[in-house]
Image (cartoon, grey):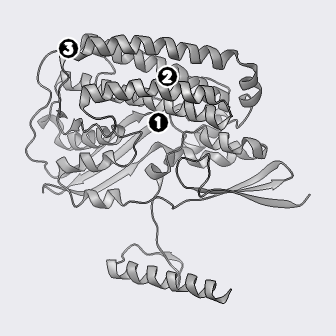
Amino acid sequence: MAKTIIPIGPYHPLQEEPEFFQLVVEGEKIVDAIANIGYNHRGIEKLSELKTFDQVAFVVERICGICSTSHPLAYVRAVEDILGNDCVVPERANYIRTIIAELERIHSHLLWIGLAGHFLGYNTVYMWAWKERETVLDIFEELSGNRNNYAMMRVGGVRRDFEEKSLAGVITRLNKLIDFVQMIKKAVLDDPVLHARLKGVGVLTKQDCIDYCALGPTARASGIANDVRKDDPYAAYDKVKWNVITQIEGDVFAKAVVRILETLESINIVIECMQKMPKGPIYDNVKDIPCGEGIGHIEAPRGECFHYVRSDGTNRPVRHKVRAPTYMNLPTYKEALIGETISDATIILAAIDPCYCCTERVTVIDANNKKNKTVYSQQDLIKLSQRKTEQIRAKLGAR
């Protein structure tokens, strides 16, 4: 049978961000898949070297709108790792960090549940999930002043405290949200159409996840109970009761179940943190960052988010490295796609909850010797861009 290439992207209705996939198919069956990345790059790591340590926390919030507290939390923990015993984060700040991080997980998972429903033509779930996500964003606005990019994290603690009068109302709204998520859970678990559509589709075995170093719900849906919150506790995660959610099937249905059950766990974590949150200061006032290097990793909604920071004793980092969870999860797409049908391709890709703008790096290749060339001046890049533009114009003119 002849092979055909079907493109998905770079701009596609079922992709929230641009990315280009090519499916090699025989009839309806996918026999190979090729990813062409590089459509999002904003130079965040390089920008960090031009900002003070305090300013960088605001910059990394912009890496991802859905993980806009995951990146700053991982970043400040990396800087606190450099400080060592010279920085002690107050207990109240640790509880606030946990509350913000888990509210973010709730709204991220509700966003994914809604989009998954939309991808499957189940727009009722889409509307329900996004309506209740608005409740979480309203809570964010009440607690932090912002519906997104909450600007709560700082080296040594958090920037703003919660008003005690707000907490009781927030708990009431979260208890109502539990009822909604339970309804979604029942709808998904009992719906024979979703079972037929998602079970056995896009399977990643436990060994596949180990081979590709998959993270977060992608790995936990295949029976791997890795979670930074349990494996290397931070903030207040060791002060509250919660469970790591796993499934063993590794298919798209299992990934949906993991995210729904994790949403319930996150709501309970937030409520318990609010009930147990101690009084006291919200930050340890840090003045200078010494020479050294540190790492900070946290469990973002999609998996482990890792930041590395190196200091030379000045007021800004000399190197900042970011590894987002999709960077590890995206390569699993090939294992999950091959052997499936074209109609399942987009939901399989969406099942890892990809964030391409978190993920991508830029590598410049010297066309003459085929080796990486990373030292380009601004003028070099402008000339390369102008040359490419002229080549495109010449081709269009020739037609």
Q: Position of residue 325 (x, y in %)?
A: 47, 42
Upstream in sequence: badge 3 or badge 1:
3
Mark 2: amino acid = Glu
Viewer-side label of 3, 2: 3
Please name the residue that numbered disc 1 is placed on.
303
Instruction: Using a 10 Å C-alpha cutoff, classify the residue at mark 2 as few (fewer than 14 neighbours), some (14 to 19) or many (20 or more).
Output: many
Q: Residue at x 64, y 17 (%)?
A: 187
Cα separation between marks 1 and 2: 12 Å
Q: Is residue 308 left or right of residue 342?
A: left
In this rendering, the answer to whether 51 lies above or below 199 is below
Please name the residue that numbered disc 3 is placed on.
165
Q: Secondary structure at mark 1?
A: strand
Please name the residue that numbered disc 2 is placed on.
262
Mark 3: amino acid = Lys
Seen from the viewer's position, the closer of residues 70 and 146 is: 146
In this rendering, the answer to whether 363 lies above or below 227 is below
Instruction: Using a 10 Å C-alpha cutoff, classify the residue at mark 3 as few (fewer than 14 neighbours), some (14 to 19) or many (20 or more).
Output: few
Viewer-side label of 1, 2: 2
Q: Position of residue 17 (x, y in %)?
A: 52, 51
Q: Secondary structure at mark 2?
A: helix
